[in-house]
Amino acid sequence: MGWFTGLIKPYMAAALTGLEADYQLHQIRFLLAFIMITIGTVTLNYDWHV
């Protein structure tokens, strides 16, 4: 939630460099991690075999 509101942005490594590419890479990493955690949680909840 803090990431979406922008509260964490000043503390990110991308904020230290100030490069837009670093920020975009951070967004992609966050999105992939969020998707993997969501899929993992759903598979555990429904007892699916991965």
Image (cartoon, rainbow, N blue to C red):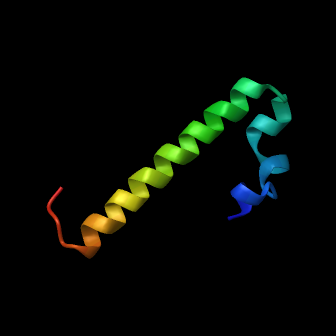
Query: Left or right: 28 with respect to 45?
Result: right
Quarter in which the N terminus is drawn: bottom right
Residue 18 image offset from top left, x and y in percent:
84, 30
Snapshot quadrant of residue 4: bottom right
Q: Residue at x 41, y 60 (%)?
A: 38
18 vs 12: above or below: above
The residue lying toward the viewer, choosing from 6 and 13, is 6
The foreground one among 35 and 15 is 35
Q: Does 19 appear above or below 46?
A: above
The structure residue drawn at horizontal position 26% and vertical position 65%, both measured from the top left corner, is: 43
* Image location (x, y in percent) of residue 17: 82, 29
Residue 8 location (% of width, % of height): 78, 55
In the picture, the quarter occupied by the C terminus is: bottom left
Residue furthest to the left in view is 49
Most extreme residue toward the front, as rendered? 5
Q: Quadrant of residue 7?
A: bottom right
